[in-house]
Amino acid sequence: MLLDSVRPLPLIEVVKAWHGRRPMSVGTGSESAVAEALLAHLGLRHYFSAVVAADHVVNHKPAPDTFLLCAERMGVPAEKCVVFEDADFGLQAAKRAGMDA
């Protein structure tokens, strides 16, 4: 099964260290069913208060919509958010949302 070959990025150690100290969310270009299944399979879903996926927004990365919805769902102003990204278009989206990346 494809899920069995997926491993979390080393960044997950940062997520674990900050869990419960700051709200965190996932903003992904994947569909929500895929993202939720992957996070559940890896045992990581409980670290995130929100998951914003491609089917939740009209304009995808590099548009800021995904990250702006993450901020809204966490109840945090965009300018107070920090984004960790693995792709250039995601970094562009974060900057367009007014977030540090």
Image (spheres, grey):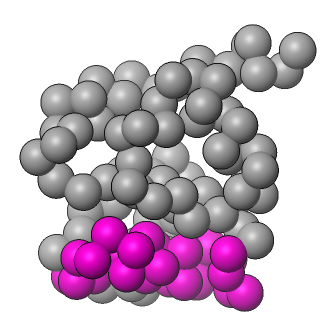
Between 64 and 87, the one lying in front of the other is 64
Between 61 and 32, the one lying in front of the other is 32
Identify the residue shown where x is 64% and y is 24%. Answer: 41
35 versus 7 height, above or below: below
Quadrant position of the C terminus in the picture: bottom left
Between 33 and 78, the one lying in front of the other is 33
Q: Is residue 19 left or right of residue 36?
A: left
- Report if residue 66 lies within the magenta region: yes
Q: Given the current orientation, which residue lies at the most extreme right position?
A: 1
Quadrant position of the N terminus in the picture: top right
Q: Is residue 89 visible?
A: no
Tell me residue 87's x, y (percent): 55, 53
57 versus 25 height, above or below: below
Tell me residue 10's x, y (percent): 39, 23
Identify the residue shown where x is 48% and y is 54%. Answer: 26
Identify the residue shown where x is 71% and y is 57%. Answer: 32
85 versus 45 height, above or below: below
Identify the residue shown where x is 71% and y is 37%. Answer: 37
Q: Given the current orientation, which residue lies at the most extreme left position?
A: 21
- Report if residue 88 lies within the magenta region: no
Which portion, as a residue range, is magenta? 56-79
44 versus 73 height, above or below: above
Q: Is residue 62 left or right of residue 79?
A: right
Answer with the quarter of the image where residue 38 lies. top right
